[in-house]
């Protein structure tokens, strides 16, 4: 079974449309901007009819993404902002265009559905921007805490952190035996012995559970231990999310955020306003303006010249304005899926006929 790659698609003449997208198509690029490329390919007939259908292919860095014709038109019918932009990039951003792509008229896919698709996408960017703020304000130490850090010992009407309890008593955690207490969730009788081969509180530093021991009959517990398992699970999830983010974050964008000191991802916030402005233009003008004439305003947002809360208020006001604009527009309610399906079949027939 042939594995599809960007190179294989190009080398075998499957690519029918290729454009520069992202900041360079918006006119918002700076000297350090990456070049994002998207395209459309048509599978060979045997792959399309067989079991080898592939809807999407991208390179390792994900800055080149190709969509199979069916997937491309499916996303167009759902008013996906990124895909609609591909049909409306400036002429200079079109790298390759097969004549069959002229059969797709952008107006077929512009509808009142764009209100929700563009606005909802915009507000996911706000969440991303806010998510960065939380990570900056609440960094997580690299060394992960252990089960022991979430255990507490109840003795003499007090609850002491396990580590403090062990230190004060001069005890070793490896010599502790635990036995579950019936009807008390995450509570254990704590035993201690230098002679008996107890399992300790946790056998390994990276353990996710406390360790239970076989307790001889007649042994008396010296205290009760509570393991805050829920808090430990939440902590482990947050620790993983934070350090995954550190490993994958765009260092240039992160440095920009730290430099302007506003503690939110200003590039995400720039795209919030770009999307909302485009949504308004679709309602008023009936077209998608990919290239932005409001470059100075959008780049000012990217440079962190505005406060986060003020931007959120402005964005919410812009979003609240959209329903009336779309209600008053002459746009179709939604793309005609039946016509799009017929067009898809026709394009594929023409292409395979060639």
Image (spheres, grey):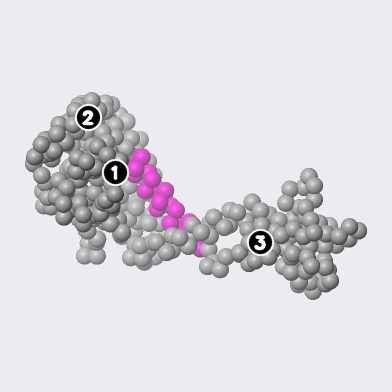
Is residue 135 shown in magenta?
yes
Which quarter of the picture shows residue 282? top left
Q: Nearer the viewer, residue 230 or 71?
A: 71
Looking at the image, which residue is at 43% across and 63% down?
A: 246
Is residue 61 shown in magenta?
no
Cα separation, mark 3 vs mark 1, equals 47 Å
Q: Is residue 175 visible?
A: yes
Looking at the image, which residue is at 25% across and 28% down?
A: 337
The residue pinned by badge 2 equals 341
Tell me the SS state at disc 3. Answer: helix
> Considering only order in the chain, which callout, 1 or 3, is on the residue closer to the N terminus?
1
Looking at the image, which residue is at 79% across and 71% down?
A: 171
Cα separation, mark 2 vs mark 3, equals 56 Å
Q: Which residues are magenta?
A: 119-139
Q: Nearer the viewer, residue 62 or 170?
A: 62
The residue pinned by badge 3 equals 147
Looking at the image, which residue is at 42% across and 48% down?
A: 127
The chief SS type of the magenta part is helix
The residue pinned by badge 1 equals 52
Q: Nearer the viewer, residue 306 or 64?
A: 64
> Considering only order in the chain, which callout, 1 or 2, is on the residue closer to the N terminus?
1
Tell me the SS state at disc 2. Answer: helix
């Amino acid at each position: 079974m042939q594995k599809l790659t960007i190179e294989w698609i190009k080398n075998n003449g499957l690519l029918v449309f290729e454009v520069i997208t992202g900041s360079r198509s918006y006119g918002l690029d700076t000297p350090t901007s990456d070049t994002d490329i998207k395209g459309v390919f048509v599978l060979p007939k045997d792959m399309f009819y067989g079991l080898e259908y592939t809807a999407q292919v991208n390179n390792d860095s994900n800055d080149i993404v190709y969509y199979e014709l069916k997937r491309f038109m499916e996303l167009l019918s759902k008013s996906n902002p990124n895909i609609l932009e591909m049909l409306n990039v400036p002429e200079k951003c079109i790298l390759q265009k097969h004549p069959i792509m002229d059969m797709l008229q952008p107006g077929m896919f512009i509808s009142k559905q764009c209100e929700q698709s563009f606005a909802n996408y915009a507000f996911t960017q706000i969440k991303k921007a806010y998510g960065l703020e939380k990570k900056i304000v609440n960094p997580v130490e690299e060394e992960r805490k252990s089960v022991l850090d979430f255990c507490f010992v109840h003795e003499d009407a007090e609850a002491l952190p396990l580590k403090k309890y062990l230190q004060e008593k001069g005890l070793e955690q490896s010599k502790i035996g635990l036995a579950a207490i019936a009807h008390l969730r995450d509570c254990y009788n704590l035993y201690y012995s230098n002679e008996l081969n107890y399992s300790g509180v946790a056998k390994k530093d990276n353990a996710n559970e406390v360790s239970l021991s076989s307790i001889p009959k007649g042994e008396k517990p010296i205290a009760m231990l509570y393991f805050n398992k829920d808090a430990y699970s939440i902590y482990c999830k947050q620790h993983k999310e934070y350090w995954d983010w550190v490993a994958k974050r765009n260092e240039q964008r992160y440095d920009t955020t730290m430099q302007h000191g506003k503690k939110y991802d200003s590039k995400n916030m720039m795209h919030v306003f770009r999307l909302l402005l485009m949504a308004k233009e679709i309602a008023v003008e009936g077209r998608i303006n990919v290239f932005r004439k409001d470059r100075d305003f959008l780049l000012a947002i990217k440079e962190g010249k505005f406060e986060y809360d003020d931007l959120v208020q402005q964005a919410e006001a812009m979003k609240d304005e959209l329903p009336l604009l779309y209600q008053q527009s002459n746009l179709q309610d939604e793309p005609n899926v039946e016509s799009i399906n017929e067009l898809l079949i026709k394009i594929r027939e023409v292409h395979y006929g060639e």
